[in-house]
Every structure is written in structure tokens, then in C-alpha cells.
Amino acid sequence: MRMKKFRLIGAALLSLSLSGCAGLLVGGTAVAVSVAHDRRTTGSVVDDQTIEFKLYDALNKKLPPGNRISVTSYNGAVLLTGETVSDAARWQAEEIARHLREPPVRMVHNELIVGSPVPLSVQSNDALLTTKVKTALFQINHISGFDPTRVKVVTSQAVVYLMGLVRMNEADATANVASQISGVRQVVTLFELMD
């Protein structure tokens, strides 16, 4: 049985490497990390996944219960969204993220809100809005070389956060498209601009 598990993990990693994805082994589980169209290096993509896993673990261990925190890392920039039980927990979450050293966190965008965790209906609406924005980005065809898969979209309480390594015209077009999606309350751009 153990040998079968290793063969399955090996086959998954081989298939990921052949499909333009990097494989990451976390706790004995293979995780797909797409790098085919990403402007980040493969190492940065893997570091971002590692940052997310480590921060989830650290936040669960160090914060009081009752928080609902999502962690998104892009090129070492961390976005914290969701709800915390107190202002002290909100700032403690940011400090935990800032002090992660391996891999290093370059900056933290603390968008946490103090309050009760939102109901499943709000979370479901956020997931739907994320899907709508990601789909709408494929309509941007007037920019040569634009690849919508390079934009990370995160939605929390109908606020859409956009992350990625993009050019100024790509950032403007992406924010414009996202702002036109019905139900989006606000668009926050956290892009790193390229020359």
C-alpha cells in the first residue's frame, strides 16, 4: 500500500512537470502549481504556496479561535482577507505574516475586518464574483500578449482584490473589467507594475 502511494505521488509529479506545472510536496500530498504562463519564477510560485501553507498553520496556532482568515501570497506580497474576532487579532495576524522569514514575506496587505465570520451565502457569492471576474478578463483582447491567467483574483465581501506582475495598460484594463461586474462593490489593485 505504501509503495502504491509513492507511485501515485510520483506519477502526479511527473504529469505536473510535463503539463507546465511545478509540483510541490506538502505533507505527503502533491500540489499543482501552474507556472506555464506565470511571470514569476518557478521558485517564486513555490515560495508563494509555501508562504500560504505556513501562514495558515501559524495563524491557526497563534490566534484566538473564531477568526476566518484567507491568506493569498503573490511574489512574496501577502493579502489577508476575512474576519477577526477583535482588532488585536487583526493586528496580530499582520505581525505573524510580517515575521515569516522562510520564505520571506516582502509586504503585507491587511484587509481583515473585525466582526463575526460571514455566512456561507456571502462566501458563496464571493466565489461566484471571483469566477465572473476571471471569466470576464478573457474579454481583454486589445492588449497584445495579455494573459488573464497572470492575474490573481480574490474576493471578500464583494470587494475584489487583483494581484499580479502586470504592465500599466494591463492593470488599467483589468481593473476596468472587474469594476463592471454586477455585484462587485469595490476593486482594489495590488499589482506590481512592470516596465
Image: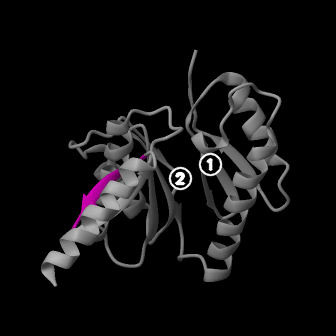
The stretch in magenta equals 21-27
- Residue 146: give x, y in percent of width and height: 69, 32
Would residue 44 be seen by someone viewing this image from the given angle? yes
- Residue 157: give x, y in percent of width and height: 66, 64
Point out the residue furthest to the left here: 2
Would residue 57 be seen by someone viewing this image from the given angle? no
Which residue, given by chain and number where applicable, does mark 1 sit on? 161
Q: Is 119 or 180 nearer to us in this picture? A: 180
Relative to residue 4, is residue 30 drawn left or right?
right
Queried whether the magenta region covers residue 24, the answer comes back as yes
- The quarter of the image holding the C terminus is top right
How crowded pointer 1 is (Cα within 10 Å; few <14, some 14-19, many 20+) is rated as: many
Relative to residue 63, is residue 177 drawn left or right?
right
Local secondary structure at mark 2: loop
Residue type, label 1: Tyr
Spatial CA distance of label 2 from label 1 is: 10 Å
